[in-house]
Amino acid sequence: MPVYTLPELPYDYSALAPVISPEIIELHHDKHHAAYVKGANDTLEQLAEARDKETWGSINGLEKNLAFHLSGHILHSIYWQNMTGDGGGEPLAQDGVGEL
């Protein structure tokens, strides 16, 4: 059975200040994202138990719960990688809508 882990941040908690405070980054990573990881791992255990006990009626709900937690984990993992303290370049001339 796979076990999911909370990835390390690719930067320090203070790297995104003043746009996002270190406290918010720490809370969001260490509590919020960690809850998705724990939820996915807990649900995997519950799914294994349901299959072992042949309680097939609970599997559909558990699979939905797993999808919720895994999507939260994956999206947050992408989110952390896409944030940078150096700004990533020059700001758009106006609102950027015309450039999309």
Image (cartoon, helix red, strand yellow):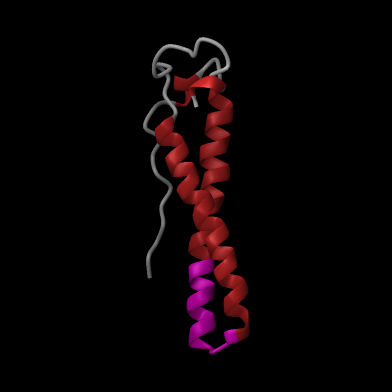
The x and y percentages for residue 40 are 51, 60
In this view, 26 is above or below 20: below
Residue positioned most to the bottom: 54
Check if residue 28 falls in the magenta segment: no
Callout count: 0
Position of 47 with respect to 58 (left or right) is: left
Position of 37 with respect to 10 (left or right) is: right
Residue positioned most to the front: 98
At 53% across and 50% down in the image, what residue appears? Answer: 72
Which is nearer the eye, 39 or 84? Answer: 84
Q: Quadrant of residue 28?
A: top right
The residue range painted magenta reads 43-56
**Quarter occupied by the N terminus:** bottom left
Which is nearer the eye, 90 or 57? Answer: 90
The x and y percentages for residue 59 are 57, 78
In this view, 41 is above or below 23: below
Check if residue 49 falls in the magenta segment: yes
Which is nearer the eye, 32 or 88? Answer: 88
User: Magenta region, mostly helix, strand or loop?
Assistant: helix
The x and y percentages for residue 13 are 47, 26
Position of 34 with respect to 90 (left or right) is: right
The x and y percentages for residue 33 are 53, 45
At 48% across and 86% down in the image, what residue appears? Answer: 52
